[in-house]
Amino acid sequence: MHTYWNFLKKVDKFQDRVLTISHRYWEFTKKGVSAPFTSIDTIDWVVIIPTLKSGEFVLVEQFRPVVESVTIEFPGGGINNNEPPIDAAIRELEEETSLRAEEIREIGILRPNPAIMSNTCYVYHAKNCTFSGSYNFDQFEDINVKTYSKEMLERMIISGEINHSIVVASYALYKLI
């Protein structure tokens, strides 16, 4: 399948502090056609599913200006340059929730939208977490940390109260391990 695709060039169209939008020109030799494919290039991310010793899940509420509403999410964020994903997961977990985990392990890798996005999202489960009391929010973060039972979390997903696709996909990975 891949043998019919011939990469021609990449042209950046827009860049800001979060992403680069580019056109990647490809030729589809099987049909003799070529076209630009729009690509949104961002840094890779981590998402962490924290559970307490009680079995409760810890999620964060935060206002998302793009959708103009408060979302309920698992903690997570961008991976810094040359930072191993596991280190980013540990850092983001503590920064956003003040949690430290007895054990943290990768449970899967997601491609948020491979039709137009080039990044990877690493999903971790942080087990037996305890609150350390030390937050370190980013410049534009104002986060409320909340705990939920498994039943409540699943009701919120089913009802659409939690509708962040990465959160739902991450929870699906968690349920499958």
Image (tube, rainbow, N blue to C red):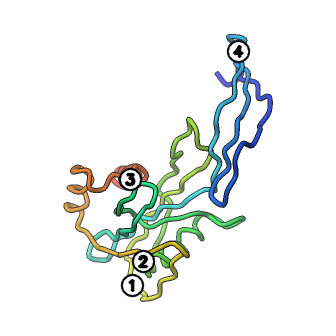
Q: What residue is at 70 percent from the left and 52 percent from the top?
A: 15
The answer to which of marks 2 and 4 sits earlier in the sequence is: 4
Q: What residue is at 47 percent from the left and 83 percent from the top?
A: 135
Numbered badge on residue 131:
1
Q: What residue is at 39 percent from the left and 69 percent from the top?
A: 50
Question: Residue 90, position in %: x, y?
Answer: 53, 73
Dot 2: within a 10 Å radius of its alpha carbon, few (fewer than 14), some, or many (20 or more) residues? many
Numbered badge on residue 164:
3
Residue occupied by mark 2:
97
Q: What residue is at 39 percent from the left and 71 percent from the top?
A: 127
Asked if marks 1 and 3 touch (Cβ < 8 Å), the reply is no
Query: What is the three-letter code of the residue carrying label 2?
Result: Thr
User: For the residue labelled by badge 3, is the local secondary structure a helix, a strand or a loop?
Assistant: loop
Query: What is the three-letter code of the residue carrying label 4?
Result: Val
Q: Can you name the residue that lies furthest to the top here?
A: 31
Q: CA distance from mark 2 to mark 4?
A: 50 Å
Query: What is the three-letter code of the residue carrying label 3?
Result: His
Front residue of 38 and 7: 38
Question: Residue 174, position in %: x, y?
Answer: 38, 55
Question: Disc 2 or disc 4, which is closer to the eye?
Answer: 4
Where 98 sits versus 4, above or below? below
Q: CA distance from mark 3 to mark 4?
A: 36 Å
User: What count of labels does the image hold?
Assistant: 4
Residue occupied by mark 4:
33
Q: Can you name the residue that lies furthest to the right here?
A: 9
Question: Disc 2 or disc 1, which is closer to the eye?
Answer: 2
Where 38 sits versus 118, above or below? above
